[in-house]
Image (cartoon, coloured by chain):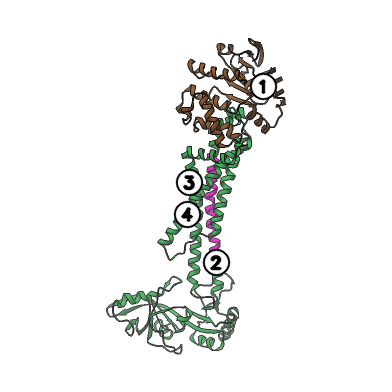
Chain colours: A green, B brown
């Protein structure tokens, strides 16, 4: 009986001495595996990126926005259309009457031209309170936070981001300088650290002023959002129910706000993006099937080209199982080498993509690597099985003299 | 050694039946030197393929070394082929990507002989056939005579009992042909049963026993010399 080492060596010789054919099969397999590795890395990268965008909120924050959608589950409404605004009085009530709420940051948002001396810039202006720093987990690079004042009092203090500081001030002194935002003037008391990107909004290129001042600036009595940080030891779902109930009371029994917790939102995003990763992985798997079909075709051609050789091997004492093994080991080698090349290629491209786009956490999940290798093996061997069986069943005399 | 009884083999060309072997009876003893002659299509090669277990009879019995082979499973026929039979083909049938030594090692590889032993046996037979210096050459780098000698080396390296040669000099010039014939006859003198299919009457006459086939039947079975 033919020894395993000899089967491997014989098959290796076939691969080496039929280079073009071998390269074609290796290429098909490598591209199939690489496409799974790369596409799932894209999907997983997108998932991690989006989750990362929300991660700053932490799991102990509730967000309230005006408007109520009747449907439950799924993504929250991005813009609410409410009959009644959320007001600063509502915020005060929430702060006083619900003990679970620690920091509470009302939010007004708009766009305004900000200027200092001769320089001006059109940016996002946020109106909030000192609590925003704690709720959003922001850090200050320079200066201090806004003063703690009543929410309905407009102060003349403001915080600015790093980009805005660089664009407006250059080398000028920042802290204590007065800048103009629309018709309003404010004094810079602090500069935010880092970028603070979230929801596609770049906080480094924005200005934060007191909420009452922003309401006047934008002539907007209603709030865009209210962010609440829940105290340690309190249940977030319970707090959410209390906030909803209180808002209903404050709004004459009408449930016209939406309260969301980042965890629920993240879980939904996670589900959706996870399914997307799985989807692109499945699409990429089709390329493995194509690779498998190519291996089948090339193995069929190989069987056809080597029919005389098969007849000769049989004449020299080879059994059907020996012939089948020779062709299957050849396919197995092609699959393993091709998959290894594809894996290396795919992971290298993913690593390069991480270098090129450091903000997106491209990452190929372990399950995708395992699936790619398993599918490669199944496709490679599965599709070679038929031709190998065909070769093994040829009658020696027919194979040797190429008779039908 | 070989016993054929009432062996028939029919091929079909469209609707037309061709009786390649038509009720063949044949007894061959160990060490005999037989030639099989006859016109094209007379069934010579079919007989050789049948004897080499490359083909199965439609009916009749074929005993090789006291084993009835006609209905034997393919795996056991492969084992018998490996153990008893060596082939020399007119077209050499060398594997083009393997060098001379690797071609000679093939039957040993299929029989599970270890690489070191294979190499030694292959080198021994290469030396014996005067091809030691051509061991690393691919078939395309060898002359016709050398290729056939490599094919003979491959056929005898496992020390078979029966050597089946189908037109072994058919593709060779007269000098190379004579060399190959002398080699085959030497092997016969050493005890191997030699079966040679040929069109060449002169070559056929060198055998000790002559079979003449016409239309799938053995019409003449004569001896010019007893077996050794």
Whether residues under marks 3 and 4 lie with C-beta atoms below 8 angstroms apart, the answer is: no
Residue B107 percent across, percent down from the top left? 58, 31
- What span is in magenta? A269-298
Nearer to the camera, A92 or A345: A345
Whether residues under marks 4 and 1 lie with C-beta atoms below 8 angstroms apart, the answer is: no
Residue B106 percent across, percent down from the top left? 56, 32
- For the residues labelled 4 and 2, the Cα–Cα distance comes to 24 Å
Crowd tier of the residue under label 4, counting other residues whose Cα lies within 10 Å: few below 14, some 14–19, many 20 or above: many
Q: Chain of mark 2?
A: A
Comparing labels 4 and 2, the label whose residue is closer to the camera = 4
The secondary element bearing badge 3 is classed as helix
- On the image, which quarter does residue A252 sit in? bottom right
Q: Earlier in the sequence, mark 4 or mark 2?
A: 2
Q: Chain of mark 1?
A: B
Q: Which residue is mark 1?
A: B10
| Residue A295 highlighted magenta (yes or no) | yes
Comparing labels 2 and 3, the label whose residue is closer to the camera = 3
The secondary element bearing badge 4 is classed as helix
> Looking at the picture, do discs 1 and 2 lie on one chain?
no
Nearer to the camera, B183 or A231: B183
Q: Which residue is mark 4?
A: A346
Q: Is residue A404 visible?
A: no
Q: Which residue is mark 3?
A: A27
């Amino acid at each position: 009986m033919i020894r395993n080492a000899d089967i491997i060596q014989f098959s290796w010789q076939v691969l080496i001495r039929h280079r073009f054919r071998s390269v074609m099969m290796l290429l098909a397999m490598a591209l199939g595996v690489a496409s799974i590795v790369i596409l799932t890395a894209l999907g997983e990268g997108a998932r991690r990126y989006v989750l990362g965008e929300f991660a700053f909120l932490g799991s102990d924050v509730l967000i309230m926005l005006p408007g109520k959608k009747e449907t439950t589950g799924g993504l929250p409404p991005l813009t609410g259309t409410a009959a009644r605004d959320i007001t600063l009085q509502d915020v005060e009530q929430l702060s006083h009457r619900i003990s679970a709420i620690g920091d509470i940051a009302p939010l007004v948002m708009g766009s305004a031209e900000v200027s200092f001396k001769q320089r001006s810039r059109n940016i996002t202006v946020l109106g909030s309170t000192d609590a925003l720093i704690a709720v959003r987990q922001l850090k200050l690079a320079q200066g201090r936070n806004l003063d703690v004042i009543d929410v309905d009092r407009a102060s003349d203090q403001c915080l600015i981001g790093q980009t805005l500081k660089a664009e407006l001030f250059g080398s000028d002194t920042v802290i204590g300088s007065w800048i103009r935002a629309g018709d309003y003037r404010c004094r810079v008391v602090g500069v935010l650290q880092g970028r603070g990107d979230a929801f596609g909004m770049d906080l480094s290129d924005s200005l934060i002023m007191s909420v009452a001042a922003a309401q006047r600036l934008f002539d907007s009595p209603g709030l865009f959002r209210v962010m609440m940080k829940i105290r340690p030891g309190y249940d977030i779902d319970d707090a959410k129910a209390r906030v909803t109930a209180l808002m209903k009371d404050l709004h004459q029994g009408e449930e016209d706000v939406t309260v969301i917790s980042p965890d629920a939102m993240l879980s939904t995003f996670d589900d959706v993006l996870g399914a997307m990763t799985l989807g692109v992985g499945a699409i990429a798997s089709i390329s493995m099937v194509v690779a498998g079909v190519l291996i089948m075709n090339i193995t069929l051609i190989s069987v056809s080209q080597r029919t005389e050789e098969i007849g000769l091997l049989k004449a020299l004492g080879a059994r059907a199982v020996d012939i089948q093994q020779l062709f299957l080991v050849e396919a197995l080698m092609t699959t393993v080498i091709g998959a290894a090349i594809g894996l290396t290629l795919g992971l290298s491209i993913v690593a390069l993509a991480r270098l090129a786009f450091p903000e997106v956490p491209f990452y190929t999940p372990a399950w995708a690597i395992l699936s790619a290798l398993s599918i490669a093996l199944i496709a490679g061997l599965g599709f070679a099985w038929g031709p190998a069986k065909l070769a093994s069943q040829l009658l020696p005399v027919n194979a040797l003299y190429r008779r039908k | 050694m070989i016993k054929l009884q009432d062996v028939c083999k029919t091929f079909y060309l469209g609707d037309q039946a061709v009786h390649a072997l038509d009720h063949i009876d044949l007894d061959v003893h160990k060490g005999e030197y037989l030639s099989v002659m006859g016109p094209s299509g007379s069934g010579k090669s079919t007989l050789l393929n049948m004897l080499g277990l490359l083909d199965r009879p439609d009916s009749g019995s074929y005993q090789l070394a006291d084993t009835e082979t006609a209905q034997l499973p393919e795996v056991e026929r492969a084992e018998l082929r490996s153990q008893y039979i060596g082939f020399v083909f007119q077209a050499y049938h060398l594997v083009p990507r393997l060098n001379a030594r690797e071609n000679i090692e093939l039957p040993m590889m299929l029989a599970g002989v270890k690489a070191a032993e294979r190499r030694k046996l292959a080198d021994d037979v290469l030396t014996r056939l005067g091809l030691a210096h051509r061991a690393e050459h691919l078939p395309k780098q060898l002359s016709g005579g050398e290729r056939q000698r490599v094919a003979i080396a491959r056929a005898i390296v496992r020390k078979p009992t029966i050597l089946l040669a189908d037109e072994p000099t058919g593709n060779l010039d007269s000098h190379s042909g004579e060399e190959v014939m002398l080699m085959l006859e030497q092997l016969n003198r050493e005890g191997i049963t030699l079966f040679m299919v040929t069109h060449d009457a002169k070559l056929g006459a060198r055998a000790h026993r002559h079979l003449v086939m016409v239309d799938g039947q053995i019409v003449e079975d004569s001896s010019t010399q007893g077996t050794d």
